[in-house]
Amino acid sequence: MNVLVTGGTGYIGSHTCVELIKAGHKPIALDNLCNSSVESLNRVRTITGEEVPFIKGDVCDEKLLHEIFARHDIDGVIHFAGLKAVGESVEKPLDYYQNNLGSTMSLCRVMSAHNVKKFIFSSSATVYSGDNEMPLRETSKTGNCTNPYGWTKYMCEQILRDIVKADPEWSVVLLRYFNPVGAHQSGLIGEHPNGIPNNLMPYISQTAIGKRDHLNVYGNDYDTHDGTGVRDYIHVVDLARGHVAAVNYMQDHKGESVFNLGTGHGYSVLDMVHAFEEANGVKVPYEIAPRRPGDLGTCYADPTKSREVLGWEAEFNQVDMCRDTWNWQSKNPNGYDE
Ligand code: NAD
Ligand code: UFG
């Protein structure tokens, strides 16, 4: 399938381009580079031996989208492009609503005009409301998001559901990611957050390499085995393969479907710190800090539906996640910058 991959130079997008190529699909990347570098696609070429056609541009630009759909024979779209920093979304809500909702609506409008109706959306476990029992199933309650970023994912899901209701020819797959971590085993592509990382794994690896003095562990009084927050960390290559499974699924399934992409295992902050130290023979100094506002104690997936319906399940374990994160970090201390 020829797949337009918006956000294709980003962290998850670049790993997905690799797995799409390996599975015989043809990705075309569209990205405005607001949070990534086109160097990631040079690295994808090194890994796969194939060039990913790249268009620099904004997904909110409908004129450009029309040109792309007219010029390329696109069969379906994976929509990764979006802003994703939770804290920033609280400070700049309009930027988040404009970009994340605007891009999704423009894309769907133009797709419809060109009769392309296969769409995979990057959603998030953040759409689940905080009062659910664990593990989270696709049928668990959604809403009550704690920040504008979460609401953009929730609202995009609703918009996409309504599009399918109005036109049953659409195939929409909503993928709810849990906590993506790690990097490609080659160490050529990985995650490079701008500035101080918000997420745990990049903070751990930047602490191990000496860029950060110590890790703040946000709270040790949660109702978990060691008091620190528990999450469902998933290797980014497993996550990328989940998209390939979804591409295959949507070729012969119409309507809307939703899948969790997680492992079903929860690890605490300190579990991750200790696993990282052990897997890589490095030290990660940490201090216990107050809870971070908006955080849940525990969040992990029930991945049964993805296994049964998509035939996908995560293959990499916690040691793989820690080893591959460190391999990328130590080979590329400044990410894709020289
Ligand atoms: P990323 O920032 O590395 O990738 C997103 C890409 O989209 C970037 O390359 C950015 O330049 C691009 N982009 C943003 N707005 C754009 C626009 N209007 N037009 C064109 N390009 C644009 O982030 P990622 O971690 O790869 O996340 C990909 C998707 O997955 C996002 O939608 C994110 O919200 C979602 N997601 C991520 C996580 C996570 O923890 N990484 C968890 C759940 C969901
Ligand atoms: N944590 C720390 N110190 C840090 C960073 C994080 O102790 O410096 C803790 C958090 O308190 C939490 C755990 O590590 O217990 C994971 O935190 P992350 O920020 O890495 O991830 P979250 O689960 O908070 O959120 C992530 C993404 C969201 C996404 C959500 C669900 O950032 O965008 O997963 O998919 F919505």
Image (cartoon, grey):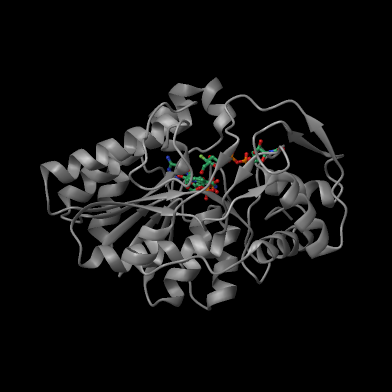
Front residue of this view, candidates 324 and 142: 142
Return the x and y of residue 54 as percentages of the image width and height.
45, 59
Front residue of this view, candidates 135 and 18: 135
Return the x and y of residue 90 as percentages of the image width and height.
53, 23
- Residue at 28% from the left image edge and 40% from the top image edge: 106
Relative height, residue 250 to residue 213 (above, below): below
Front residue of this view, candidates 308 and 203: 308
Relative height, residue 198 to residue 303 (above, below): above
Relative height, residue 103 to residue 88 (above, below): below
- Residue at 31% from the left image edge and 69% from the top image edge: 248
Front residue of this view, candidates 228 and 178: 228
- Residue at 52% from the left image edge and 38% from the top image edge: 84
Please indicate whether residue 213 sits to the left or right of residue 80 in the image.
right
Q: How many marks?
A: 0
Image quadrant holding the N terminus, namely bottom left
Please indicate whether residue 77 sits to the left or right of residue 189 in the image.
left
Instruction: Specify whether residue 61 is in view.
Output: no
Relative height, residue 202 to residue 239 (above, below): above
Please indicate whether residue 118 sits to the left or right of residue 148 in the image.
left
- Residue at 53% from the left image edge and 76% from the top image edge: 48
Return the x and y of residue 101 as percentages of the image width and height.
35, 34
